[in-house]
Structure formats: structure tokens, C-alpha cells
Image (cartoon, helix red, strand yellow):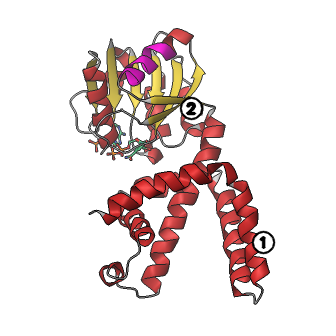
Amino acid sequence: MQVGIIGGTGKMGRFFADVFSSAGWDVSVSGRKTALTNRDVAEQADVVMVSVPIRETVRVIAEIAAHLSERQILCDLTSLKAEPVRAMLTSPARVIGLHPMFGPGAESLRGQTIIVTPARCEPEDLTLLLDVFERQGASITITTPEEHDRMMAVIQGLTHVSTLAAAETIRREEVDVAESLTFTSPIYRIQMGLIGRLLAQDPDLYGDMLRMNPAVPGVLAAFEDAVRDLRSVVESDDPARFREYFARNARHYETYGSDATRETDDLIRCVVSR
Ligand SMILES: NC(=O)c1ccc[n+]([C@@H]2O[C@H](COP(=O)([O-])OP(=O)(O)OC[C@H]3O[C@@H](n4cnc5c(N)ncnc54)[C@H](OP(=O)(O)O)[C@@H]3O)[C@@H](O)[C@H]2O)c1
């Protein structure tokens, strides 16, 4: 089988080129500077995978759509799913949306999750692709593009916005990062690790994920309200209000509490033993 990766010169494209090579597939790649064009890849490969920056994705799909046939599988790795899948469906190809929930620094697919949004395909198309990933240890979550984007507004949108907001607050408070680490508790060190890790990455990827997911504004509005409400609880003179606020949330996370404590205990042990 042959997979052609458009944007295969990029970080995730290279990662998936290795995944398919390890599975014994022929791999070809195109980028803006490769001799092979996007159209060549679209015309030749059994599976065409689009792995270009989010803001380029729909345009690149539109460029290749007319060169695909109904025998081919068209998939993408975009961190958003509704718009790219809609664009892929304008081609005659079989369409499967993918979103790897990890970055290109992962050592392998072992223990990693890939979200899959099958849009127009036969069961054997899905098996062909998912076998490659599952045999290398990935877990698969199947959903719709819309549900994916709604979940990502929380899983990526809320997480990255709250991390960036914490980074901005620490900077505005003129707290020296290195000095603060000499006062550190393990939890603060983990929080700082998340801030440092995020800020060491590609701003365009994170900007696109936040700006281009239509479900993000609603989640951010809820986050803003939550911060405002929490501030009023913290600044009130009434300890019962804080206790009630805390208990309401503890009830919502009740069944998760012991797993969360066990997992974060492992993290704390790692941080403390370094
Ligand atoms: N990085 C992550 O952590 C991560 C995680 C999950 C999913 N994703 C998704 O993976 C996709 C790629 O992200 P990435 O991090 O691998 O980005 P990247 O490293 O910037 O790679 C994107 C590649 O696309 C190529 N490209 C840009 N415009 C193109 C065009 N018109 N035609 C053909 N190739 C083009 C670029 O190659 P040239 O400059 O050589 O043209 C570049 O190598 C995105 O959709 C992103 O949402 C990324």
C-alpha cells in the first residue's frame, strides 16, 4: 500500500511517515519545496494524508480534491475536525478524519490516543488505517467531527487558555520564574512545567487551535464567568461560601478523585526525585 503525506516534510508528517514505513507501506511526501507536488501525491497514493498547518488545511484539500478518485482514502491530521472533514467530503474519495492527541516528540504510538472521525468510508477502509495505528500501540477513540471540536474546546482550548492566563498573571505580577522555583511546592513546579512546555512550542499551532475552533468562544465565556464568580467567593468574608463552592465541584469530580490523586502522586514523586 502507498500513503502520500501532504505536508510530510513537517513535524507530524515525518512522525506518521515513520509509522507507515514501520508498517511496511510505501511512503511519499510533498511540501511546498519538494519535487513531488501535492497533486502528484493525490494522483498516486492509495491513502492521501493532509498534514499542513491548520489555517492551510482547507485550501490544500480544495487544491487536491478534484485529483482524487473514489477508490482512494483521504484523511488528515488536523487538530480541528468539522471544517477539514467538510472540505474533504467535497472530493470523491473515502474520507476519514484523524487527530493524534500527542505531539511529534512522542517516541512511538504506544499508549497514545488517536481520535478518528469516519465521514464516508467502508468498514474495511477504517480497518486498513486503524490496524496500522493499533498494531503500534495506539488507542482509538471514534466520534463525530462536531463532538470532537466541542471536546477540544475544553481539552485543548480551556487547558491552553488557563495555562497562558496563569503565565500572563505571573509575568504581570513581576515574579521572577527562577526565583519562584526556589520557593517551590511540587504542584507549583508541575504548573510551571506546563507553562514552560507550552511556551516552548509553535505559537501558530496554538493560535490556530484556539482561534479557529467555533466552540472555543463559548468555553472561554464560561471560563471568564467562572473566574469572576470564584473571585467574588474568595474575596467574600464568608468561609461557608467557599466551602459550598468547593463542595459543589468536589461532587462533580467525585468518581475521579482517587484516580486523580494516584496519578498526580506519581507526577509529584517524579518532580521531587529530580
Ligand atoms: N505539532 C503538534 O503537536 C500536532 C499535534 C496533533 C495534530 N497536529 C496537526 O498536524 C498538522 C501539521 O502540524 P505540524 O506541527 O506537523 O506542522 P509543521 O511542522 O509546520 O508542518 C506542516 C508542513 O506543511 C507544509 N506545508 C505548508 N503549506 C503547504 C502547502 N500549501 N502544501 C504542502 N505542504 C505545505 C510545510 O512544509 P514546507 O514549509 O516544506 O512547505 C510543513 O512542513 C496540523 O494540522 C496540526 O493541527 C499537530
Q: Residue at x 69, y 65 (%)?
A: 221
Residue 38 in the image, given as x and y percentages of width and height = 34, 29
Closer to us: 255 or 203: 255
Whether residue 107 is visible, yes or no, is yes
Q: Residue at x 78, y 71 (%)?
A: 244
> For the residue labelled by badge 2, is the local secondary structure a helix, a strand or a loop?
helix
Tag shown at residue 85: 2
Of the residues shown, which amino acid type is indicated by label 2?
A: Val
**Mark 2–mark 1 distance (CA, rounded to whole Å):** 44 Å
Q: Most extreme residue toward the left, as rendered?
A: 35
Please provide the residue range marked out in magenta.
126-135
Mark 1: give few (<14), some (14-19) or many (20+) Cα within 10 Å. few
- According to the picture, the residue beneath numbered tag 1 turns out to be 244
Q: In the rendered structure, which disc, 2 or 1, sits on the residue that comes first in sequence?
A: 2
The quadrant where residue 7 appears: top left
The relative height of residue 116 versus residue 212 in the rendered view (above or below) is above
Residue 28 in the image, given as x and y percentages of width and height = 26, 23
Quarter of the picture containing the N terminus is top left
Q: Is residue 130 on the magenta stretch? A: yes
Closer to us: 233 or 250: 250
The relative height of residue 109 versus residue 265 in the rendered view (above or below) is above
Of the residues shown, which amino acid type is indicated by label 1?
A: Glu
Choose mark 2 or mark 1, whichever is in front: 1
Tag shown at residue 165: none
Q: Residue at x 48, y 68 (%)?
A: 164
Ligand number 1: quarter of image: top left
> For the residue labelled by badge 1, is the local secondary structure a helix, a strand or a loop?
helix
The quadrant where residue 132 appears: top left
Q: Is residue 78 left or right of residue 214?
A: left
